[in-house]
Image (spheres, rainbow, N blue to C red):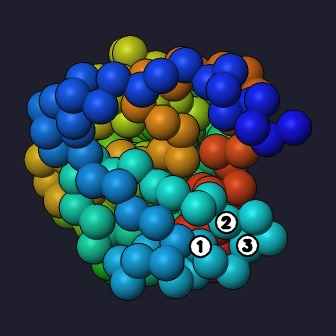
Amino acid sequence: RIPDLLRDLPLIDRAAARATLEKYAIRIITISADNYPRILKEIPAPPPVLYVRGNIRALSATMLAVVGTRQPSSYGRQATKLLVEPVVRSGIGIVSGLAIGIDGLAHQLALTAKVPTVAVLGCGVDQFYPWQHRELAENMLASGGAVISEFPLGAKPERHHFPQRNRIISGLSPAVL
């Protein structure tokens, strides 16, 4: 029963949550907000809430979703560059998952081309996963990109979060590479 579920939820420390939101300049947008990405509302199960670090306007840019292996071959890296560079040079941004490998390369290509790039995390936006891409994420934020998640502050990168995250990556773009 719902009342039992609500009773069993841990209490939220509102002051700590507010401090984290302020510390990382995190904004929360709901599906009913004007700045919620219109294209994302079209997927079968749009997230009701998005936690956003960085430029919210980047979420409404025209983007190509890029996902791939975490251990790309040299051919895979070459093919990614060959396919993504013309896209970003034309002004189209990149949305991906900040993962090691193809995802990170796609984000970096967008940064080089100075177009928006958005990372969708499988954890809370108050942490970066994988930790090896902390600097990449910071560069994305500094260049007008965004890091977003539907998972609340403090959420750890659980295995089952990544398929949920992937629907947002694909939902923010009319095409997926």
Judge the density around disc 3: few (<14), some (14-19), many (≥20) Cα neighbours within 10 Å: few
Q: Amino acid at mark 2?
A: Pro
Question: CA–CA distance between discs 2 and 3?
Answer: 6 Å
Question: CA–CA distance between discs 2 and 1?
Answer: 6 Å
Element under disc 3: loop
Taking 40 as reference, is 59 left or right?
A: left
**Badge 1 vs badge 3, beta-carbon distance below 8 Å:** yes
Q: Amino acid at mark 1?
A: Leu
Among numbered discs 2 and 1, the one appearing first in the sequence = 1
Which residue in the protein does label 1 denote?
40
Taking 101 as reference, is 36 left or right?
A: left
Judge the density around disc 2: few (<14), some (14-19), many (≥20) Cα neighbours within 10 Å: some
**Badge 2 vs badge 3, beta-carbon distance below 8 Å:** yes
Judge the density around disc 1: few (<14), some (14-19), many (≥20) Cα neighbours within 10 Å: many
Q: Position of residue 75 (x, y in %)?
A: 63, 37
Which residue in the protein does label 3 denote?
43
Q: Which mark is residue 46?
A: 2
Report the quarter where the C terminus lies: bottom right
Front-lying residue, 45 or 95: 45
**Badge 2 vs badge 1, beta-carbon distance below 8 Å:** yes
